[in-house]
Structures are given as structure tokens and as C-alpha cells.
Image: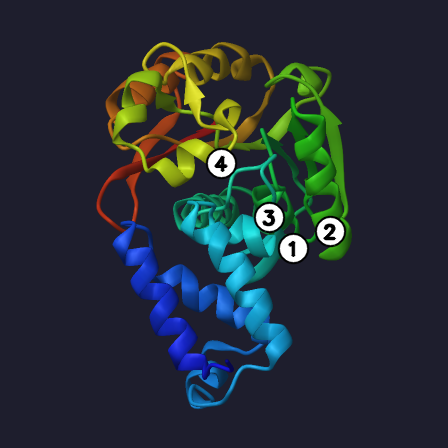
Amino acid sequence: MTERIYEALNKASALLEEKELDPGAARILMEFITQKSRTDLFSDIRDFLPAEQQEEFWAKAEELLQGKPVQYIIGEESFYGRMFEVNEHVLIPRPETEELVYGAIERCKSLFSNKEITVADIGTGSGAIAITFKKEWPDALVTATDISAEALTVAKRNAQTLEADIVFIQGDLTDPLSKSKWDVILSNPPYIAHGEAAEMSDTVLAHEPHSALFADEDGLYFYRKLAKSLPQLMNKCSLIGVEIGYKQGPAVHKLFQDAFPGAVVETVKDINGKDRIIFCKSCE
């Protein structure tokens, strides 16, 4: 039986709500299946779904109902106004990370004007941070690293699709960067403490890569490693920006202030008012 768009949407949304899953995922899926913008979808809401699209919608809706994130089902997510390929080898880019990129670019304008700068993104995943920085600051020389070969494969495809000239290197944290000096280093490392897993949604736990989510030492392991190794890698005028868990502001702030005694270290809140980013700005 052929369904109208609104009938399929209402039914799928209700089924998701019953399972305490995000009902908004049904709309995102429908936009992808019909290749309509949100505006077009609602203006055509009473149209009948072609049989092929209806079949595809319900096949993929079954995956939604099993808890799979809609971004992995459709294979993409928007970040900073650009579409990035994502799969289960990389984290789904989130709005908080857009704030890291925006804040870094704004601080770089005052530190470096618009000159050519060297930038590294540690643990690049889908490549969202590195590629976005390159697109927004075309003169930047951008390097992106990740320990995961599968993640780098995704990031390279995104760079090619978005026409961003990035150097990709496989390796652990700062190891691939140790032979150079850097103006800017950005990172969204794993920062969730293992004990916080119980607070997380089943959708995230079951599908997103745990190696990109969890860290030892109450989530501080990678920040301690970065604070120890970065002082030897930064140019005299430099900026470091890292995303943090909302409970980690004071601890990470202290790690970087101790590592860079003469630097200005800022704890920046996200749009929800939670500690989310540490910036360490030095110009000695």
C-alpha cells in the first residue's frame, strides 16, 4: 500500500519514540531518501512516496529502530556547512567541535593575521577539523594524523571530495609530528572516562568507535600525554586547542598552564554553557 510522506514520517517517528530513540532521525532519513531539502519535504508532505523510495525508507528505518545512528545509515553528516562521509570507523562530527574550529580560527586571526601557518589535527577521524580549517584558511599548511588506518581512509576521501589539500599521516598522538615545529595544533581526543559509559546513550555505545570515545585516567590520559609532548613541538607564537568533557575544565586547564607557564590558557564554554574547549595561546 502506497503511503504519503507524512504518513510514513508519523509512523516511523512514533515507532522511534516507543523505543526512546530520536524521532527526528525519521525526518533526516526521509530527506536523504527523497533527496529533498527540509523546506521541500514539508511543502510536499502530502505527496505519495514512490514505491521504490517507500521500500528503501522502511528498510533503513528498521536499522534506525535497532539503534543505529541515522548518520551511519545515510553515510554522511554536515559539519561547518559541508557534508562529510562518515561510517563506523569514525566519530560522527558534532556541533561542539564546530565551536573548536571557529574559536581557533578567530584566535589565529589575531595571532597570525592571514599568513601561511602550519596546522596539525591530532586524531582526525573523518577529517572534519583539518579539512574545515583548510577550507576556511586556504593558506594554512594542514597535516592530519590518526592511529586508525580505517579512519584515515575516510578522511582522505572527504579531503578529495571537498578539494582540501591535506597531508595525512598514520601514527599515535604527536609521534608523526615530532620532526617539525607547529603554529597551531588542534585535537578532539578520546575523553570520556570508562565510568561514564552508563550515562551514555545505547546508540553511541553500540555503534561509535570506542577507541575514539574512551580514555583512561578518568578521561585525562590523552591530555596528560599532549601537555607533556607539545611544548617541544610548538613555535614561539602558537595556539593549541582541544575539546574536553564538560567535567574536565579545571583539570585540563591546569595541565596546559603547567606545561606552558607563560601562555594564556582559556576554558571556553559551549553553546549549552558547559566547559568544552581549552585554548592555550603563547607568543613569547
**Does 51 appear above or below 62?**
below
Residue under pointer 3: 133
Q: Which residue is mark 4?
A: 207
Which of disc 1 and disc 2 is earlier in sequence?
1
Name the residue nearer the viewer: 189 or 70: 70
User: What amino acid is at disc 1?
Assistant: Lys
Tell me what residue is drawn at x 24 percent, y 23 percent. Answer: 250
Mark 1 surroundings: few (<14), some (14-19) or many (≥20) residues within 10 A: some
**Mark 2 to mark 1 CA distance (whole Å):** 7 Å
Q: Please, what secondary structure does the residue beneath circle 2 have?
A: loop
Q: Which residue is mark 2?
A: 164
Instruction: Determine contact: label 1, label 3, CB under 8 Å.
Output: yes
Could you give the CA–CA distance between mark 1 and mark 3, rounded to whole angstroms? 6 Å
Q: Which residue is mark 1?
A: 135
Of marks 1 and 4, the one in the foreground: 4
Distance CA(mark 1)–CA(mark 4): 29 Å
The residue lying furthest to the left in this view is 273
Residue type at mark 4? His
Q: Residue at x 45, y 80 (%)?
A: 5
Are the residues flagged by discs 2 and 4 in contact, CB closer than 8 Å?
Answer: no
Q: Are marks 2 and 1 in contact (CB under 8 Å)?
A: yes
